[in-house]
Image: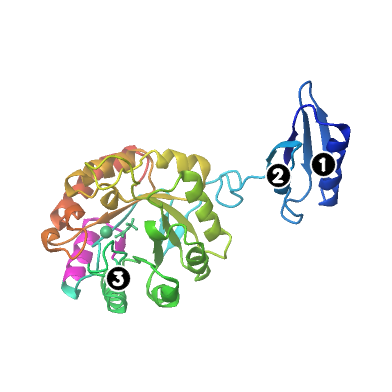
Amino acid sequence: MIIVLKPRITKRQENSVLREIRKLGYEPHVMRGVARTVVGAIGDEEKNPSLEKLTTWPQVESVTPIQSRFRLVSREAHPKNSTVKVGRHLIGGKKMQVMAGPCSVESEKQLMETAHAVRKAGATILRGGAFKPRTSPYEFQGLGEKGLKLLAKARDETGMPIITELLSQKHVDLVAEYADILQIGTRNAQNFQLLIAAARTGKPVLLKRGMSMRIEEWLLAGEYVLANENAGLMFCERGIRTFENYTRNTLDLSTIPAVKQESHCPIVIDPSQGCGRADLISSLCKGAVAMGADALLIEVHPNPAEAWSDGAQQITLDGFKKLMRELKPIIKAAGRS
Ligand code: PEP
Ligand code: MN
């Protein structure tokens, strides 16, 4: 910790700070400048009590931790890119991963038709919501376990691992029994008990960015996952709240270089929730790939006009096929396969 003392304090006030630092298990090193005195407190910040309480002392100007708050997610802690293994796929490796499927699982026919089509077009992981976090309680809430069973059936038929949202702590065991990746949605991004429970299932976690979350808060939420016996963490940008309402959210593509710079964890882009409009998905995917995203999470539906949720942003099976074709040269130019 670096403790900056206020100017013109008495020797007695300074000594009482040094005494307190020693009492809490740290060794103070005093640096006397012209205007101010700075104290470096050296000691194990994990074992000893925090020195933060000194901020309330009248002779103290500031207390700054030396150790990063991002002990596990930061690139400092792990300089190389980390990868997340899902079945035979590696997220964060050389291969660009595409997770695609409907917003909600609606029926066996809808899911199987979508699963086969997206796999054929080149998707590697199947997405589909069985528990849906809907803004209104009167909207479709998802098929629940029946939806999970259909996802498992689609996995059996296509060989694609599945990603689905874990909405509540009471469903942890149930969802983990079926899912290959647990998706934590934007509304739960700072539900820390849920993050811990998700991490402890031993399934990889995809952590969406909270719609009003700063990057620092998002990384700290990820810290909860990595600190709890997890099987891997991916960050997923899905758009944030801004004043703009041309799009449903504002997809913050600057998170790609930012997360890459700050963290070793893979970054996934969800353009579907990100813009809420089928007509913009293709451009956003291309931009995301070119900027170095490790994976895309795209909503695809056989008949978006009839979708039970998020109809305006889901692309058709043909639209997805076309998109995958168009992405090929960009994936290659980004140095991926
Ligand atoms: C979704 O992926 O369908 C979803 C509800 O995501 P988000 O949590 O980003 O809104
Ligand atoms: Mn959706």
Residue 114 within the magenta-colored segment of the rendering: yes
Q: Are marks 2 and 3 in contact (CB under 8 Å)?
A: no
Helix, strand or loop at label 3? It is: loop
Indicate the amino acid at tag 2.
Thr
| Of residues 144 and 5, the one drawn nearer to the viewer in this rendering | 5
User: Residue at the location (25% across, 66% down)?
Assistant: 104
Reading the image, the residue beneath label 1 is 17
- Circle 3: is it few (<14), some (14-19), or many (20+) Cα within 10 Å? many
Q: Which of labels 1 and 2 is toward the front?
A: 2
Answer left or right for 48 relative to 323. Answer: right
**Residue at image mark 3:** 130
Marks 3 and 1 sit apart, C-alpha to C-alpha, by 56 Å
Considering only order in the chain, which callout, 2 or 1, is on the residue closer to the N terminus? 1
Number of other residues with Cα within 10 Å of mark 2, as a class: few under 14, some 14 to 19, many 20 or more:
few
**Magenta residues?**
110-128
Residue 56: assigned label: 2
Q: Amino acid at mark 1?
A: Val
